[in-house]
Image: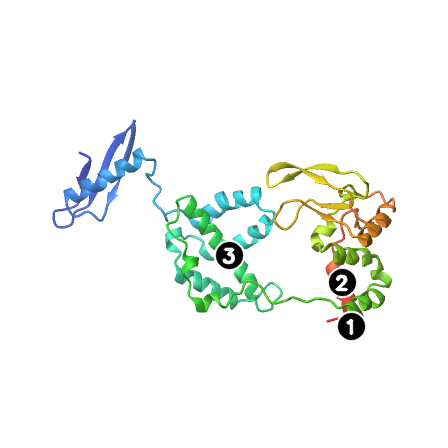
Amino acid sequence: MSVDNRGTTDVPRWYYSFMIRGVRYFGSIPEARTKAEALKVEAMKRLEVYEGRYGKEPGVKDFCEFVDQVYMEYAKNNKATWKHDLFRSETLKEHFRGLRFRDITPRSVEKFILGRLDSDSRRKSKRSPVSVHKEFSLLSSVFNMAMREEVAACNPCLKISKKVREKIPARNKRDRFMSLEEEDKLFNLGLVGSRAHFRPIVRLGVHLGARLGELMAIKRADINLSTKPFSMKLRSKGQDVKVEVRPNHVLIPKSKNGKPRTIPLSNVAKEIFADLLGDEAGFDYVFANPDTGRPYTNVGKAFGAACRAAGIQ
């Protein structure tokens, strides 16, 4: 018999059991009260087997297992910022450990947000709402992927209240443009003495509009000051790509989106690079610490000190 009542007439406990292609499938049907209802569920289970959906009910997948086995595997192969996802995922797993996707509700997401806002950071200061927003965004991304993989039925992050959402803005308002007068003070009063070797980095930051991480990653071979283009083969998001570096351009191997790009050089930028390349230091990186041969790691700290010395807020 494909369905069997192992309870009583008053309290039935129906189970299904059938075999397809030499494989036996069985399970309980707690919602069935009659044999007719149990047979309908059994027919649905058979159809799920034929369509490859058996055992894949949305929401029953463990959240932490999915993060480790599916989401992070994808992030490592496709996202330049996967390391950020890695440490933020530890926070999510700690909070939602032991829960399945269907156990995580809009209310539990709101409790997570409010709890993080009320906690202290590693520096013992109040946690930034922007940091919590990034954790929340990662949680939403995990649910979106789970929905594509058909292991989650919906994304609870889309249903949190407006009041809670307003507590975690995407970013702080920090647009700050330096005036020409402040720029003069920075170079004449701040980037002097023990900080003078950072002057070319800041100059190029002004003339290239590149991020600090992009500047630090520039190698001598990435700069084209000749009259002919050249090509570079790079690995980008798991694929081999060929990038042409035109005359008077510099290659940025990995920008914020993980893709390479080239930037045209102004006359000032060309002069700075020409001076830097003329220094035969023997290092691959243009801005290499002579003690390590690797890019400087204290530029941000030195820039802040230079601004304070120049009286720039």
Disc with the residue nearer the chain's start (2 vs 1):
2
Instruction: Give SS at disc 2.
Output: helix
Q: How many angstroms separate mark 2 from mark 3 (CA)?
A: 31 Å
Query: x and y percent of residue 34 in the render?
Result: 14, 45
- What residue did someone put label 1 on? 311
Residue 242 x/y as whole percent: 67, 36
Q: Quadrant of the C terminus?
A: bottom right
Q: Residue furthest left?
A: 9
Mark 2 = which residue? 303
Counting other residues with Cα less than 10 Å from the Cα at mark 3, is it few (<14), some (14-19), or many (20 or more)? some
Please state the horizontal and vertical placement of residue 170, each as a whole percent of the image.
55, 62
Residue found farthest to the top? 22
Q: Earlier in the sequence, mark 1 or mark 3?
A: 3
Q: Are marks 2 and 1 in contact (CB under 8 Å)?
A: no
Residue type at the position of mark 1 = Gly
Q: Is residue 131 above or below residue 219?
A: below
Q: Gap in Å between the C-alphas at discs 1 and 3?
A: 37 Å
User: Dot 1 surroundings within 10 Å: few (below 14), some, or many (20 or more)?
Assistant: few
Specify how the rendered protein is coloured.
Answer: rainbow
| Residue 67 or residue 213, whichever sits in front | 213
Please identify the quarter of the rendering in which residue 281 is found: top right
Q: Which mark is residue 228?
A: none
Between the residue at mark 2 and the residue at mark 1, the CA separation in whole angstroms equals 12 Å
Residue at 61% across / 67% down in the picture? 173
Q: Residue at x 28, y 32 (%)?
A: 24
Pick the front one: 258 or 287: 258
Contact between marks 1 and 3 (CB within 8 A): the answer is no
Question: Which amino acid type is marked by label 3?
Answer: Ser
Decide which of tag 2 and tag 3 comes sooner along the chain: 3
Q: How many marks?
A: 3
User: Can residue 197 be seen in this snapshot?
Assistant: yes
Q: Which residue is mark 3?
A: 137
